[in-house]
Image: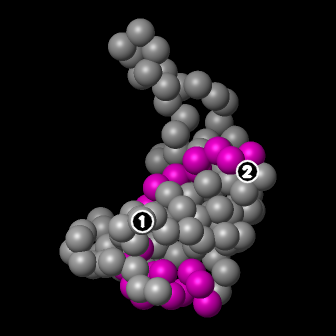
Amino acid sequence: MELNFGKMDGLVTAVIQDDASGRVLMVGFMNQEAFLKTVESGYATFFSRSRNRLWLKGETSGHRLVVKEISTDCDQDALLIRVEALGPGVCHDGYQSCFYRQLRHGVWVVGEARAYDPETVYGGPA
């Protein structure tokens, strides 16, 4: 079975979900090389659009994502990847999930405490 990398200039969307809790942790993008590295290594690898290169999630922080299951949608242009997160959080802002803000009465508010200090992990402000 082939994935459809043609719809988004060689990329597919990858929704990353915690295997134990079901919480969505982040959304990233994979090109074919990142997808193959993810499958081969068992760790989530993405294509960074801003840096124009592959990046292994956790290469700086050590907060890696161990792949438990990979599914694709009916169009084969998006992935759902269930993972075990190694570390207190996956968000570079220091939260467990990148989806830490909620819209409440028309205002975005932070809905949880930070899981770790990003300045300590990354050596500067996020």
Q: Position of residue 53 (x, y in %)?
A: 36, 79
Q: Residue furthest front?
A: 74
Q: Is residue 30 visible?
A: yes
Q: Amino acid at mark 1?
A: Cys
Question: Which residue in the structure is indicated by mark 1?
Answer: 74
Q: Identify the residue at image location x=48%, y=21%.
A: 109
Q: Is residue 9 magenta?
A: no
Q: Is residue 123 visible?
A: no
Q: Is residue 14 above or below residue 42?
A: above
In the drawing, does residue 35 fall left or right of residue 25?
A: left
Q: Is residue 79 above or below residue 102?
A: below
Question: Which residue in the structure is indicated by mark 2?
Answer: 88
Distance between the alpha carbons at the discs numbered 2 and 1: 33 Å
From the image, state whether disc 2 or disc 1 is nearer to you. 1
Q: Residue furthest right?
A: 20
**Which residue range is magenta in the image?**
21-40
Q: Residue furthest top?
A: 105
